[in-house]
C-alpha cells in the first residue's frame, strides 16, 4: 500500500479509480502490506477515508508473522499495535518490549518478534538480543530497509531487524513479502490459488512475491528505486495506469 495506494496515509492520485476499475472488470482485490505497525481497524479506516472499500481483504506482515507461531507461545514483541493484535488473535502470550523493560521481563520466551518500532532504543535492542542469544526463535515481520514518504525514504522495519540481528549474532526468519509465510497465508485465503497479478513498487518485495506466487508483476513508480521496472510485466506511474494494464491484458488473454 505504501507508495502505491497512499504516501504517509495521503491517497495517491488515481488509486481509488484504479481499484474501482479492477473491481468493475471482475477482479477480486487483496491488499497485502509489509507495514506491521497498524491494526486492521486502523488500516480499514485509512482506506475508507481514501474512498476505498477493502471488504476485509487485508493481509499484513504481522499476520504472516503470527502464522509462524502456536497458540500459547510466549512472545517478546519489539513492534507496534499491528503486531500485538495479530499475535493476540493467534492466541500467543504477548509481552511488549516496553513492558519487559519496566519489570515484566521473563527468564525466557518462545520467540522474539521484531517489526516497525518507532520507540526502538538501545535498552530494547539489548533485551531482544539477549533473549535471542539465549535460544528464543527470532522472527521479523519484514525486512524492508525503508519506505517512501513525502520527504523521501524513511527507515523501515528491516533497518530495526538488521540491528537486532547484528547484536544477537543470528539472522531473522522473515515472514512478510516475498517470503514463504506470506505466500502461504495469501494462498490459504485464496483457497490454494495464486493471484493473477501483483501490483507494487519494489522488486525486492513485490516483484519477488509475484515470482514466488507465479503471478505477473506490474510496477508502480515511487521513491523506491530498486530495479523493479526491469523485472515487471509493465512499469507505470500510478495504480490507475496499473489497473488499465491488467484489464487490457486480461481482455487479450480471454478466449
Image: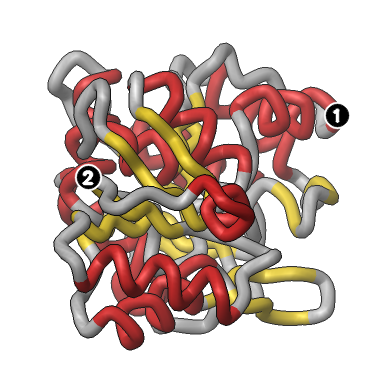
Indicate the quadrant where residue 52 lies.
top right
In this rendered view, identify the residue nearer to me: 140 or 145: 140
Dot label at residue 49: 1
SS of the residue under disc 2:
loop
Q: Is residue 45 left or right of residue 210?
A: right
Vertical comparison of 164 with 4: above or below: below
Vertical comparison of 29 with 235: above or below: above
In this rendered view, identify the residue nearer to me: 107 or 212: 107
Q: Is residue 190 left or right of residue 192?
A: right
Within 10 Å of disc 2 (Cα), the crowding (few <14, some 14-19, many 20+) is: many
Q: Residue at x 43, y 68 (%)?
A: 127
Number of numbered discs on residues? 2
Indicate the quadrant where residue 182 lies.
top left
Residue beneath label 2, please? 110
**Residue 137's x, y, as percent?**
19, 55
Vertical comparison of 81 with 199: above or below: above
**Residue 206's x, y, as percent?**
37, 58
Vertical comparison of 87 with 104: above or below: above
SS of the residue under disc 1:
helix
**Residue 245's x, y, as percent?**
48, 47
Quadrant location, the C terminus: top left
Between disc 1 and disc 2, whose residue precedes? 1
Indicate the quadrant where residue 69 lies.
top left
Q: Residue at x 26, y 24 (%)?
A: 72
Q: Is residue 162 left or right of residue 210?
A: right
Amino acid at each position: 500500500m505504501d507508495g502505491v495506494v497512499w504516501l504517509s496515509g495521503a491517497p495517491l492520485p488515481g488509486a481509488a479509480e484504479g481499484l474501482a476499475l479492477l473491481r468493475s472488470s471482475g477482479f477480486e482485490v487483496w491488499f497485502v502490506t509489509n507495514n506491521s505497525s497498524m491494526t486492521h481497524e486502523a488500516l480499514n479506516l485509512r482506506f475508507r477515508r481514501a474512498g476505498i472499500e477493502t471488504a476485509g481483504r487485508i493481509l499484513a506482515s504481522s499476520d504472516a508473522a503470527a502464522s509462524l507461531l502456536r497458540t500459547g507461545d510466549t512472545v517478546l514483541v519489539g513492534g507496534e499495535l499491528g503486531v500485538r493484535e495479530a499475535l493476540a488473535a493467534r492466541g500467543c502470550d504477548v509481552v511488549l518490549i516496553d513492558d519487559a523493560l519496566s519489570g515484566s521481563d521473563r527468564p525466557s520466551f518462545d520467540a522474539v518478534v521484531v517489526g516497525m518500532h518507532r520507540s526502538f532504543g538501545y535498552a530494547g535492542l539489548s533485551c531482544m538480543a539477549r533473549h535471542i542469544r539465549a535460544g528464543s526463535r527470532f522472527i521479523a515481520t519484514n525486512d524492508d530497509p525503508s519506505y517512501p514518504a513525502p520527504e523521501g525514504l524513511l527507515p523501515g522495519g528491516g533497518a530495526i531487524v538488521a540491528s537486532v540481528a547484528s547484536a544477537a549474532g543470528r539472522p531473522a526468519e522473515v515472514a512478510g513479502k516475498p517470503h514463504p509465510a506470506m505466500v502461504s497465508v495469501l494462498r490459504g485465503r485464496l483457497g490454494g490459488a495464486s493471484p493473477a497479478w501483483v501490483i507494487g513498487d519494489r522488486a525486492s518485495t513485490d516483484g519477488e512475491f509475484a515470482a514466488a506466487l507465479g503471478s505477473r508483476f506490474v510496477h508502480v513508480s515511487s521513491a523506491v528505486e530498486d530495479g523493479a521496472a526491469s523485472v515487471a510485466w509493465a512499469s507505470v506511474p500510478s495504480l490507475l495506469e496499473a489497473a488499465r494494464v491488467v484489464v487490457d491484458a486480461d481482455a487479450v488473454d480471454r478466449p
